[in-house]
Each structure stands twice: as structure tokens, then as C-alpha cells.
Image (cartoon, rainbow, N blue to C red):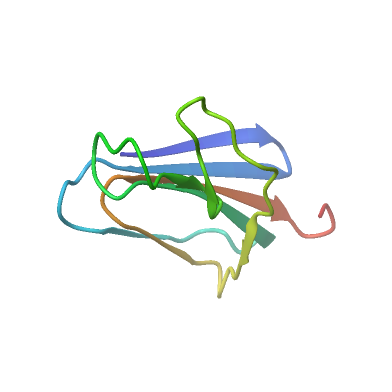
């Protein structure tokens, strides 16, 4: 599942949810030439229904839903395109900022 949200005139968010149980999902988004900065936050679990090993931005998520503060992964927007890959049983949020607004 792929969702887009324009937070304001300078910010675009892309949400990728991988419902596949076996295969990774790969999405290429184009038309981002006016965006110069991008970050990704990833939620990853070993399998669907996992009660251990789930991470958000590389930090463990405990059963009480607690986790430590994160640092988003910076990514490149190349030639107006962005490639996002997510393993099975995962989700990713990409945030794109237009030039001059980072």
C-alpha cells in the first residue's frame, strides 16, 4: 500500500506499508525535482505477528510500545526520483522537503 500526503506547500510525505509476507516491496517515485531533502523512518518486524524483534528507526519497540528517540535516515533524491525498498512485514515513511525549506 502506498499513500501520499502533502503536509503543506513545502513538505510531502510518502507512506509505504508492505503487507507481503514473503517478498520485499520496491517503489520508485518520480516527479520530485523540486524536493532536495528526504528522510525515511522505518518500522520493521521479523514476521507478521512478531512479538519480539520489531524496530522503529533501528531501535527496539517493546511490548509496552516504548522506544527511544530516533534519528531519521537521510536519503538521496536523484534526478527527481526516489527509490524506496521495504522488506516484508514492514512500513516506511518518507518525508520530502522542497529546496530552501530544510
On the rendered structure, is 79 left or right of 3?
Answer: right
Q: Where's residue 36, x and y in %? A: 70, 64
From the viewer's perspective, is residue 64 above or below residue 49?
Answer: above
Q: Where's residue 24, x and y in %? A: 25, 59
| Residue in the image at 61% along x and 43% along y | 12
In the rendered image, the residue lying farthest to the right is: 100
| Residue in the image at 84% along x and 58% along y | 100
In the rendered image, the quadrant that contains the N terminus is top left
In the rendered image, the residue lying farthest to the top is: 64
Q: Where's residue 13, x and y in %? A: 57, 42
Q: Is residue 10 or residue 68 the one in the foreground?
A: 68
Q: Where's residue 7, x and y in %? A: 66, 33
From the viewer's perspective, is residue 99 above or below residue 9?
Answer: below
Marker count (numbered): 0
From the viewer's perspective, is residue 61 above or below residue 82?
Answer: above
In the rendered image, the quadrant that contains the C terminus is bottom right
Q: In the rendered image, which quarter is residue 27 located in? A: bottom left
| Residue in the image at 73% along x and 54% along y | 98
In the rendered image, the residue lying farthest to the bottom is: 79
Amino acid at each position: 500500500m502506498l499513500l501520499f500526503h502533502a503536509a503543506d506547500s513545502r513538505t510531502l510525505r510518502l507512506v509505504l506499508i508492505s503487507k507481503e509476507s514473503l517478498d520485499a516491496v520496491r517503489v520508485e517515485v518520480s516527479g520530485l525535482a523540486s524536493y532536495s531533502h528526504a528522510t525515511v523512518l522505518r518500522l520493521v518486524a521479523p514476521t507478521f505477528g512478531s512479538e519480539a524483534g520489531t524496530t522503529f528507526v533501528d531501535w527496539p519497540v517493546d511490548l509496552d510500545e516504548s522506544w527511544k528517540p530516533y534519528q531519521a535516515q537521510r536519503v538521496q533524491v536523484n534526478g527527481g526520483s526516489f527509490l524506496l525498498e521495504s522488506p516484508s512485514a514492514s512500513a516506511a515513511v518518507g518525508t520530502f522537503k522542497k529546496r530552501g525549506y530544510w
